[in-house]
């Protein structure tokens, strides 16, 4: 148990760097607005006002040449610092262009959402499987110890291969629809 909890703590600590704000991006934007409504003086209809003098906006400091997340590697070219949390983490260099990077970010969000659903669905399936199976007059999928079928406990053989084909087909159809939709929006 100690090994598992130590591994979880190390994984959490090491992954927090990826979500740290980038040090080269500005933390706030300067807005030249009046603090009180009393500071605003109305202009007569025929009066012309002088153009407001704007202070030059300082340019952001140049991006570091080395990755902040992996200091011994060069910063990937596709990671320009424009995205929140960009610390130059692409150790295998998958993102060759900005469009590749956006596709990978979208896939990461989809997989994260799927993992969250799985984390909630796994215990729920173990709790409600017998009740649903008896209501539908089916054999329960959980084993004698009320464990959901998985690769780890050898229970995947209880689930029909047609179910896996249907799941794969549905996932492919949803993904194909998403790809077609994104091509229509970005010709």
Image (cartoon, rainbow, N blue to C red):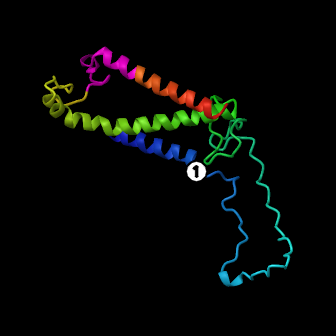
Residue 107 horizontal side relative to residue 98, left or right: left
Q: Position of residue 107 (x, y in %)?
A: 53, 33
Q: Under tag 1, what secondary structure?
A: loop
Q: Nearer the viewer, residue 185 or 8?
A: 185
Residue at 46% from the left image edge and 27% from the top image edge: 174
Disc 1: which residue:
20
Image check: 105 left or right of 78? left
Q: Say above or below: 5 vs 103.
A: below
Residue 30 visible: yes
Report if residue 164 lies within the magenta region. Answer: yes
Nearer to me, 32 or 76: 32
Q: Nearer the viewer, residue 72 or 54?
A: 54
Q: Quadrant of residue 132?
A: top left
Residues rendered magenta in the picture: 149-168
Say if the magenta span includes residue 153: yes
Residue 172, horizontal then vertical, whole percent: 46, 22
Image: 84 above or below 147 = below
Whether residue 3 is visible to the viewer of this picture, yes or no, is no
Name, please, the residue furthest toward the front. Answer: 46
Task: Name the quarter where the C terminus is drawn.
Answer: top right
Q: Quadrant of the N terminus?
A: top left
């Amino acid at each position: 148990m100690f090994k598992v909890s130590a591994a979880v703590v190390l994984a959490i600590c090491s992954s927090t760097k990826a979500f740290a704000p980038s040090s080269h991006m500005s933390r706030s934007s300067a807005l030249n607005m009046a603090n009180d409504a009393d500071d605003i003086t109305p202009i007569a209809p025929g009066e012309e006002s002088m153009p407001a003098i704007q202070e030059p906006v300082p340019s952001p400091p140049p991006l570091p040449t080395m990755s902040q997340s992996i200091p011994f590697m060069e910063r990937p070219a596709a990671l320009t610092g424009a995205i929140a949390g960009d610390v130059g983490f692409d150790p295998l260099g998958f993102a060759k262009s900005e469009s590749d990077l956006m596709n990978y970010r979208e896939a990461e969000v989809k997989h994260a959402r799927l993992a969250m659903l799985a984390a909630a669905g796994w215990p729920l399936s173990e709790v409600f499987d017998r009740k649903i199976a008896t209501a539908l007059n089916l054999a329960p999928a959980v084993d004698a110890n009320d464990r959901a079928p998985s690769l780890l406990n050898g229970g995947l053989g209880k689930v029909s291969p047609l179910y896996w084909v249907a799941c794969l087909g549905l996932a492919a159809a949803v993904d194909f629809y998403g790809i077609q939709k994104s091509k229509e929006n970005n010709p």
